[in-house]
Amino acid sequence: MRRPFLAGMIPLLLLLATGEAAAHAMLDHAEPRVGNKVATTPREVTLWFTQKLEAAFSTITVTDSAGQRVDTGKTRVSGSQMSVALRPAGAGTYRVTWRVLSVDSHSTNGSFTFQVGQ
C-alpha cells in the first residue's frame, strides 16, 4: 500500500516544484544576445526578465577578459528590464553577471558572455 501512495505523490511534488520555479524572475533575453559576437563594443547591455524587478536589489556587472569592470556601475531598472552603460573598450570576450530580486521577493542570478571583434 505504501508504494501506490508514493507513486501518486511524486507527480504532485513535481507539479509543486515546477510552480515554485515559475515564480522567479528568469532571464528572457539580452542585448547583445547571449553568446553573440558583435563588431564593436556596445554602448550598453540590456537584459529582459520574466517578471518585474526591484530596482534597489537588482544589478548588472560587465567585465572584460582580464576581469576588469567595463560597466559604469549605474544599473537602471524599469519594470522587467534592466541595463547598464559600458565604457569604451576593445575586442575580446566580455562576461555579463546579473543578480535580480523580483517583486515577489525571489532572487536569481546568472552570467553569460558575448564577444567583441571581427
Image (cartoon, rainbow, N blue to C red):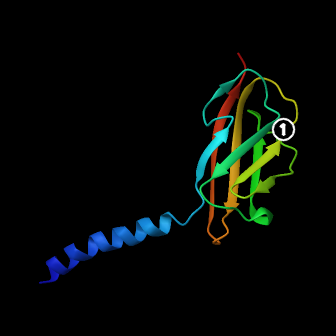
Q: Quadrant of the N terminus?
A: bottom left
Find disc 1 in the rendering and name its residue: 86
Residue 20: horizontal and vertical position, in percent? Answer: 48, 69
Foreground residue among 50 and 93: 50
Q: Quadrant of residue 30?
A: top right
Question: Please, is residue 99 above or below residue 35 in the view?
Answer: below
Question: Please, is residue 84 above or below residue 3 in the view?
Answer: above
The kind of secondary structure element at disc 1 is loop
27 displayed left or right of 2? right
Q: Amino acid at mark 1?
A: Leu
Q: Quadrant of the C terminus?
A: top right
Residue 99: horizontal and vertical position, in percent? Answer: 69, 57
Residue 21: horizontal and vertical position, in percent? Answer: 49, 64
Report the residue at 80% width, 38% height from top: 44
Question: Please, is residue 106 above or below residue 48 in the view?
Answer: below
Foreground residue among 94 and 15: 15
86 displayed left or right of 93? right
